[in-house]
Amino acid sequence: MSKPVVAITRPKDRAKKACEIVEKLGGSAVLAPTLDLEPVNSESLKNLVKRKDDLDWIIFTSPTTIVSLNRFYPDFLKTLSCKLAVIGNKTGKLAEKNGLNVDLMPEDFTAEGLIEEFKKREITNQIIGIPRTASARPILPEELEKLGNEVILAEAYKSLFPMDEKSIKDLMSKIENSEIDAITFTSPLTVENFFEIADDKAKLAELLNDNLLTVCIGPITAKVLDKYDVAHIYPDTYTVPDMMELLFKTWRETNE
C-alpha cells in the first residue's frame, strides 16, 4: 500500500507536531498553512494584566495565548493566583509546563464544553479573564456573562490571513492533479481562508469531495465545511493526534 499524502493547513508554528504524527503513522505531510497567528500586546491585554489580582478565573483557549503572555509579560504566569480553565490537552500541558495548575478542562474540547462545566459547577458572580484572538466566536464570553459573571476579554494574538498564498496555490494544484490523498483542518478559519483564496469555490469543494478524504478536528470546524458542502469526518475527541488516527484508519479501510 502506498503512503498517503496528507495536507496540513494549520498555522506553521503549530504544524510541526501534526507533520510528525503523519510521518509516524506512515504518511507524507504537505504543509500549506491557511492561517497565521501573531502575538499582540493590545490595549485590552494590557488592561487584563493590570487587573490580574482582581481575577477569580482565567481561561486559556489555545497555546498561543500562553506564548503571547510569556512574550510580553514574562512574570504574569509566575504570579497568577486565580483559578485556571483550559480548552484542550495541548493548552493544559503548556500551562502546566509554565508552573500552573489546571482547575478545569472539559472533556468536550470546545467553548460549549467549557460553558457546560461552568454551569454544572454553578460558577457565577466571578471575574473571568479570557485572553484570546479577537476573531474567536462570541459564545464563550456571552454565556459566561449570562451566568452573572464579569468577563474581561483581551486580544492576545491576531488570526491573520495566510502570508504565503503560494504554498496554498501549490496545494490546490496538487489537489487538482490528484497528488493529495487527504486534507486536515483544525479551526474554522483554516477552512474559511482556504476557500477565500480559491478562484472557484464550487470547483474546489467538488475536488475535495471526489478526490480527497477531508478530516477536521471537531464539530465547530465541521460546520464551516458543511457551509461549503464538503463531506468530512472528525474524531470523538477533538485533538490533532485523534484526528490523524481517524484519518489513517479511514484511509486504510478505504484503500485496502
Image: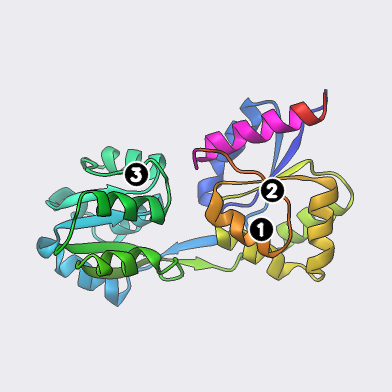
Q: CA distance from mark 1 to mark 2?
A: 7 Å
In front here: 133 or 217? 217
Q: Is residue 243 left or right of residue 168?
A: left
* Secondary structure mostly taken by the magenta-highlighted segment of the chain: helix
The quadrant in which the N terminus is found is top right
For label 3, the residue is 106
- The three-letter code of the residue at mark 2 reads His
Q: Residue at x 60, y 54 (%)?
A: 222
Q: Quadrant of residue 25?
A: top right
Look at the image and say whether residue 25 sits in the magenta stretch: no
Q: Which mark is residue 232?
A: 2
Q: Residue at x 33, y 52 (%)?
A: 116
The magenta span reads 237-252
Residue 106 in view of the camera? yes
How far across and how far down the image is residue 127, in percent?
Answer: 16, 64
User: Could you say whether the residue bearing mark 3 is in a helix, strand or loop?
Assistant: loop
- The three-letter code of the residue at mark 3 reads Pro
Q: Is the residue marked by circle 2 packed among few (<14), some (14-19), or many (20+) residues within 10 Å?
A: some
User: Could you say whether the residue bearing mark 2 is in a helix, strand or loop?
Assistant: loop
Q: Is residue 210 left or right of residue 149?
A: right
Q: Is residue 235 above or below residue 139?
A: above
Q: CA distance from mark 2 to mark 3?
A: 24 Å
Task: State yes or no: discs 1 and 2 in contact (Cβ < 8 Å).
Answer: yes
Q: Quadrant of residue 200?
A: bottom right
In front here: 169 or 252? 252
Q: Quadrant of residue 182?
A: top right
For label 1, the residue is 225
